[in-house]
Amino acid sequence: FEVKTSAQRQLIYTALGQLMIHGESPDCRRVMLLPEKEILADDLAEALTRLGIELMRFSLSETEASILGD
């Protein structure tokens, strides 16, 4: 799992590198978590799909963090 606080391109590139380097095992589940309201550029979303990286979203409140379901 790689959690980022924004969908800024440089942060996504960093997350991709971390997931690919540390998730090299074929049975490793690679997941990127982004804030629910961040818009991911189309080319980056396509790269996640191509690389087999799941995209999940999270929300934050003053008292908790929640991973959002489908």
Image: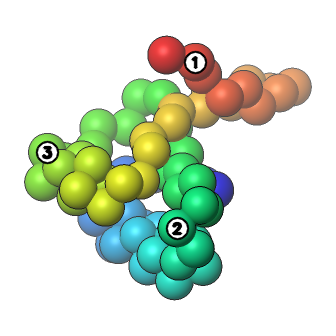
Point out residue 23 in the picture as x, y percentages from the top left corner. 57, 72
Viewer-nearest of labels 2 and 1? 2
Point out residue 57 in the picture as x, y percentages from the top left corner. 52, 33
Q: At x 59% / y 61%, what residue is drawn?
A: 27
Tell me whether the residue at label 3 lies in contact with that at label 1, contact meaning CB atoms closer than 8 angstroms. no
Q: At x 72% / y 26%, what residue is drawn?
A: 66
Give the answer, above or below, for where 38 lies relative to 23. above
Amino acid type for the residue under numbered disc 2: Pro
Give left or right: position of 49 versus 37.
left
Q: Is residue 41 visible?
A: yes
Q: Which residue is mark 2?
A: 26
Q: Is residue 8 visible?
A: no
Give the CA distance from mark 2 to mark 3.
26 Å
- The secondary element bearing badge 3 is classed as helix
The local crowd at label 2, few if under 14, some if 14 to 19, many if 20 or more residues have their Cα within 10 Å, is: few
Give the CA distance from mark 2 to mark 1.
24 Å
Tell me whether the residue at label 2 lies in contact with that at label 3, contact meaning CB atoms closer than 8 angstroms. no
Amino acid type for the residue under numbered disc 3: Asp
Task: Report how many numbered discs are placed on residues in the image.
Answer: 3
Amino acid type for the residue under numbered disc 1: Gly
Give left or right: position of 1 versus 12.
right
Q: Which residue is mark 1?
A: 69
Point out residue 15 in the picture as x, y percentages from the top left corner. 47, 68
- The secondary element bearing badge 1 is classed as loop
**Residue nearer the viewer, 10 or 33:** 33
The local crowd at label 3, few if under 14, some if 14 to 19, many if 20 or more residues have their Cα within 10 Å, is: few
Q: Quadrant of residue 59?
A: top right
Viewer-nearest of labels 3 and 1? 1
Residue 42, numbered label:
3
Viewer-nearest of labels 2 and 3? 2
